[in-house]
Amino acid sequence: MIAQTIQLALAPVFVLVAIGNILNLLSSRLGRVVDRARHLQERHTATEGPDHDEVVAEIRMIDQRIKLITRAIRVMVTCGLVIGATVAVLFLEELIGFSLQRVAAALFLLAVGLLMWALILFLRETQVAAQQLRIPRIYLEL
């Protein structure tokens, strides 16, 4: 019976691997955004006029991106914890001999919902990044 429980726990464990990869991607993006924020903070005091306004506008977008990424990380970590709880419930069910299938299913559905929420936050962050990276028309010399 324990072999069957291990087989059941395999799908959530694969989700954990995916969560780890997504967390790696999010933390890399956060690191790059934070580095850019530090650079802009240095430029903030050294600029004035239209250049200063551009720096401030970019800092505001960077701030928004940092908030979105940290929320996505928080939700993704919570998702990982719920997946771990799902696996624990599957093994606990085997050990105590009491049916906890509905609890495991509910936890797994919660984890999928959290995963989708984190991915929506990530999508929003990429939209803000793309908006920030738009090249002004004056540089295109159209």
Image (cartoon, rainbow, N blue to C red):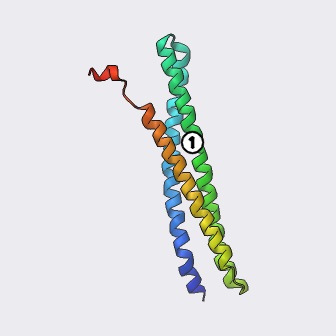
Above or below for 48 versus 89: above
Q: Can you tell which quarter of the image residue 138 is in? A: top left
Above or below for 79 versus 87: above
Q: Residue at x 54, y 37 (%)?
A: 65
Tell me where residue 46 appears, x and y as whole percent.
52, 13
Tell me where residue 6 appears, x and y as whole percent.
56, 80
- Pick out the residue farthest to the front: 142
Q: Residue at x 34, y 23 (%)?
A: 137
Q: Residue at x 46, y 42 (%)?
A: 126
Tell me where residue 28 appears, x and y as whole percent.
49, 45
Tell me where residue 135 appears, x and y as whole percent.
36, 27
Crowdedness of circle 1 by 10 Å Cα count: few (<14), some, many (20+)?
A: many
Q: Is residue 34 left or right of residue 95?
A: left
- Pick out the residue farthest to the top: 49
Q: Residue at x 48, y 37 (%)?
A: 128
Above or below for 102 versus 54: below
Q: Can you tell which quarter of the image residue 5 is in? A: bottom right
The kind of residue on which mark 1 rests is Leu
- Nearer the observer, 41 or 116: 116
- Nearer the observer, 8 or 132: 132
- Nearer the observer, 113 or 5: 113
Q: In this figure, what is the number of numbered marks?
A: 1
Q: Secondary structure at mark 1?
A: helix
* Quarter containing the C terminus: top left
The residue labelled by disc 1 is 68
* Quarter containing the N terminus: bottom right
Above or below for 16 versus 6: above
- Pick out the residue farthest to the left: 142
